[in-house]
Structure formats: structure tokens, C-alpha cells
Image: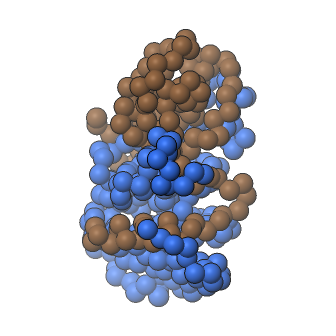
Chain colours: A blue, B brown
Amino acid sequence: MPSSNDCDALPAEALPVGIKVLIAGGFGVGKTTFVNTLSEIEPLSTEEMLTAVSAATDRLDGVENKATTTVALDFGRITLSPSHVLYLFGTPGQERFWFMWDELSEGALGAVVLADTRRLEHSFAAVDFFERRGIPFVVAVNEFDGAHRYHAEEVRTALDLRQEVPVALCDARVQRTGIRVLLELIQHLITTRSSHGSDTAPPLLRT
Amino acid sequence: MPPVLPEGPLTDEAVGRLVRPYTVSDGRTRATSHFTLVTVVRATGVQTQGTFGLEHAQVLALCESPVSVAEVAARMQVPAAVVKVLLSDLAEGGAVVAGQARPPSADHYALPDRDLLEAVRDALLKRL
Ligand SMILES: Nc1nc2c(ncn2[C@@H]2O[C@H](COP(=O)(O)OP(=O)(O)O)[C@@H](O)[C@H]2O)c(=O)[nH]1
Ligand SMILES: [Mg+2]
């Protein structure tokens, strides 16, 4: 890659880096609400092709001649800076769409698993998915009105989370609490880097 | 633009729209691996000679300023896989440029660079 002070920098270098974070959890847990609360653009959803499993991501081979059904994904945008844009994707809650998650999680920075304490079991599957694939995640307890308030530690035990997985409380309708959840995820990634010894060398010169 | 799908418990059920990618990609295949859902693209203004269709023109119009592949797909209401095909046609002729996105790492998760994480963290902190 040419250095950033190259005067003849390609125009593409002026484009921001797109960063993906997944918002997962069972049906009705508040994924759509969470994404829309944080997004600076109006609610949008994009479609992915249902028959376009991994192999077909890069090419349309095999789906060319078939009509194919699609599944909708909520997504939202947070422009962090001129060089970084964060995109939040609400994963389809139903298990029959889970094969899509593999594709969706490719290249993701990490995930937020939303949980509703009235039906924590709805988020088991999402926790399991990210654990199996080694994708870092945080659990965010969406505090619905009238639901019993649990301590983070009770949720950790109920979901059988490893000690290092952060558990945060949030209200999916409140932007500030959503930002805190995203910060928990980023801090978790930074901590994981450090504890893996990936950062033993001092960072290179920063501008 | 209003939300594409209705509110309420039907949201996750409200799928199954039939699409024919064949018509838009005219039966050819292109490698589209350099486009992800979060790749940011922008039209360059470069005129190309290709015989592009209406869909290509729509994509170009939607990316006059930087926009992600997912947003283009949502606004056109076509699957992202189709948009990637259209974009790769346009990029080939220089009509569109693409920014970077974390490449999908084949079968295991790779932790992002610390610089990236710190930039994201600092930007989020400013929004608290
Ligand atoms: N009281 C309360 N209601 C919420 C909260 N988050 C979501 N809801 C409501 O719960 C319902 C399901 O939320 P939704 O975002 O559609 O869930 P999804 O199926 O995970 O996308 C909607 O009617 C929301 O308005 C919350 O934090 N508190
Ligand atoms: Mg939803």
C-alpha cells in the first residue's frame, strides 16, 4: 500500500474504512430498535440471497438461473470520523436463517448479543454461535419495562458466559446506552489483544 | 425513504421476496470478492464505454458521494450480491472506486489492529 503522505494517493484511499458489528439475539429482544436508535440514517434493510450460501458470496454461479428468496437485515450507520464508518447489522433472529450468519460474520469486528431477562434462553443460540467461531462479543441486557432487574453476574451465570465476556445493561431505545455497549465491545477487543500478547511490540509511529 | 419492511412481529417473517439475479447480471459471472457489505464506494465521474444498463446507472447515481454497498442495495431494493456484480462492472471501467474493509478471514476470526480499535474507541467516546 502506498504511504499516506504520497501526494499521488489513489482516490480510493480517501474513502473511509467500513467496519461491521453484528447485533444478534433472539426474536423480539430489541435488535431492530438498537440498530435504529444508534443509526444516523433512516431505518434501512438490505437483502441477502437465501440460496447464496458462502460459496456464492463472491460469484453468482449457481444462483444465476434460479429465482431465489431473500432475507432482510436491518442496518444502521455511525460515521465515526472521515476515515472510519461503523455499520451495525441486526442479524435475522430466526434459527432457520442461521446459515446466513456465517456469511454475515465474515470480516466483522465483533458482535453484541442482546438479551431479554424474561427469556434469556432466546439468546443462548447467539452466544453459542459466536463462542464456537471465536468471534468476540459482549452481552447487552436490554432492560424492558416491567422486567425483573438482574445483576450482570446473574445473567453471566444463566448464560454460562466465560469470565472475560463483558455483560452490560442497556435500553435499546436510548442512544447513550447503546454507545456504551459498543464501547464495551471495543474495550473487550483491546483487552483481548493485550492479553494475547499481540501488542508486546510498541506501536509504530502514529501521526 | 420509509423502512423497507413493516414493523412488528412479522419483520423476521416478512422475507421471501423472489428475485432473479439472472436478469441483472445477464448470465455472466464476475468475481466480486473485493466488495463486502461495508465497503464504501464512490463514483469517479469517469465515463466508461461499456454497455451498461439501467441498474448500473442507478448504482452510479446512488454513489455520487461515498456510500456502503449495503446502503446501495437497500436503496435499490435488490440483494447485495447483485449490487456487488454491478459495482464490479463499474469498477472495472474506473467509474467507481472502493475503499477498504476488513477482509473476510477465511475460517477464523482475526483480531483487528490496535490502531483501528483505538480510533473506533476514541470516536465512540466523543459521542457519549
Ligand atoms: N420497553 C422497552 N421496549 C423495547 C426495548 N427494546 C425494544 N423494545 C420493544 O420491543 C419490541 C421488539 O423489539 P425489536 O427491536 O423489534 O426486536 P427484534 O426482533 O430483536 O428486532 C418492539 O415493540 C420494541 O419497541 C426496550 O429497551 N425497552
Ligand atoms: Mg427485528
Assign the C terminus of chain A to one quadrant of the image: bottom left
The picture quadrant where one finds residue A52 is top right
In this view, A108 is above or below B98: below
Residue drawn at (55%, 73%) of the image:
A204
- Residue A84 is left or right of residue A60, and the answer is left
Q: Position of residue A178 (x, y in %)?
A: 34, 67
- Horizontally, residue A135 falls left or right of residue A111, namely right
Residue drawn 43% across and 84% down?
A152
Q: In this image, B25 relative to B117: left or right?
A: right
Q: Position of residue B31 (x, y in %)?
A: 68, 33
Numbered marks: total: 0
For residue B67, what is the image quadrant? top left
Q: Residue at x 63, y 83 (%)?
A: A200
Does residue A194 show up?
Answer: yes
Nearest to the observer: residue A55 or residue B68: B68
The foreground one among A112 and B60 is: B60
Residue B113: image location, x then y, percent: 56, 68
Residue at x 46%, y 40% (from the top left corner): A11
Note whether A76 is above or below A132 in the view shown. above
Question: In the figure, A135 relative to B20: above or below?
Answer: below
